[in-house]
Amino acid sequence: MAEKTNILFLDFDGVLNSMRSFWKKFADFYEVEWTEDDFDLKWVYEGHTENMNPDLWERIEKARKEKKRFPDIGMYKWPHEEEAIQNLNKIIEENEAKVVVCSSWRIGKSPEELQELLEDWGAKCEVIDKTIKIHRDFNSRGFEILEWVMENRKRIKGICILDDEAPYDINFIFEKWAVQDIDTNKHGLLESHIPVANKCFQIQINPLYDFDKWLPKEKLKEARKEDGVKPPSEWEPLPPPRGDMDSQSYGDLPDWRDTGEMGG
C-alpha cells in the first residue's frame, strides 16, 4: 500500500490571484505608482470602490481613458498575488502536503505543466494530479473532488480544500475540510487562513462513511467490499454499559451507528 499523505486541493482564481493582483497589473501597465498600503484590507472594510485606495483607483481610471489600451490578461496570464503564494507555501510546508489541482486552469494542461506554472509563480509544491471534469450545471467541483478522493482513498492521510467558491460548490460535501472566507474580490489566500487550513488537515476523513449519501449505492458497496469494510447495518451491537458507570439500561435505545437505508 502506498504511503498516506496530506492532499491539498488547490483552486487558482480567487485563491492565488484576486482583484488586488488584477489592479496592481493595471497600475503597472499604465505606469501609475502604487504602494502596498493602497491595497491594504482597510480599504476593503471601508467599502471603497474596487477595494483599494480611491485615489489610486481614480489615477488608474484616468490613465486608462487617456491611453485607451488594456493589459493582456487572458486565462493563463492573470497575475498572481505574491502574499497568497507565500501563504500557500507555508500551508504546504507545515502539513507536508501534495497538491491536486481542482482549478479550471487544469483544463488542457498536464500536472507537469501545472507544476511548472506554479513554480514560475514561486510556489514550492509537488503537483501529483488534477481532478477530472464533470459536466454539471452546479456543484460540479464538489463531485470532482469526491471522485478523486474515492479513487485515491487508500493514499489519503488528510485533506484541505482552498477554493474561493467553497460555499457554492464544495461545502455541501466537504465543508469541514474547506477553508472558508477566501474572497476573490477582496484578498485571496491570507495569512489568517493558514491555521484554518492546518486544522482541516487534522480532521479525520473516512470516505466510505463520510460521503456515503453522495455515492451510488453499488459503487459504495463495491468500495467497501474491496477495502474489507462492513456497512453500518452489519456492525456489531454496542456493548452493554459498565455497571460502575450507570445503572440505567440502554438496551431499548437504537444503535446510533445504524444509518438506515442510505449507504447501508
Image (cartoon, rainbow, N blue to C red):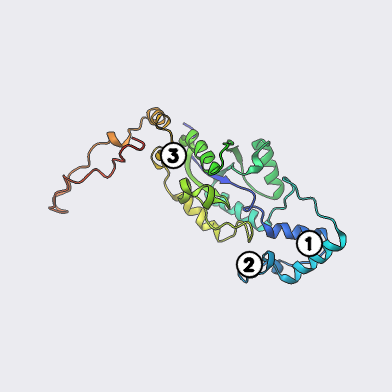
Lateral position of residue 219 relative to residue 55, left or right = left
- Residue found at x 50% / y 56%: 196
Q: Position of residue 85 (x, y in %)?
A: 65, 53
Q: Secondary structure at mark 1?
A: helix
- The image position of residue 165, as x and y in percent, is 57, 51
Q: Residue at x 69, y 60 (%)?
A: 20
Using residue 244 as the reference point, say whether residue 217 is left or right of it.
right
Badge 1 crowding class, 10 Å Cα cut-off, few under 14, some 14 to 19, many 20 or more, is: many
Residue at the disc numbered 1: 27
> Which quarter of the figure has residue 133?
top right
Instruction: Indicate which disc residue 139 carries.
Output: none
Describe residue 2's horizontal placement relative to residue 68 as left or right. left
Looking at the image, tell me whether mark 1 or mark 3 is earlier in sequence order: 1
Percent position (x, y) of residue 107?
A: 66, 38
Say left or right for 75 vs 202.
right
Mark 2–mark 3 Cα distance, whole angstroms, equals 37 Å
- Which residue type carries mark 1? Ala
Give the vertical position of 121 relative to 111 (above or below). Answer: below
Disc 1 to disc 3, C-alpha distance: 46 Å
- Distance between the Cα atoms at labels 1 and 2? 18 Å
Residue type, numbered disc 3: Trp
Residue under numbered circle 3: 214
| Rendered residue at 64%/37% (across/down) | 111
Q: Position of residue 246 (x, y in %)?
A: 15, 54
Q: Are marks 1 and 3 in contact (CB under 8 Å)?
A: no
Q: Are marks 1 and 2 in contact (CB under 8 Å)?
A: no
Residue highlighted by disc 2: 44
Looking at the image, which residue sits at the far front? 137
Q: Give 143 or 191, whichever is nearer the viewer.
A: 143
**Judging from the image, what secondary structure is the residue with disc 2 in?**
helix
Total number of numbered discs in the rendering: 3
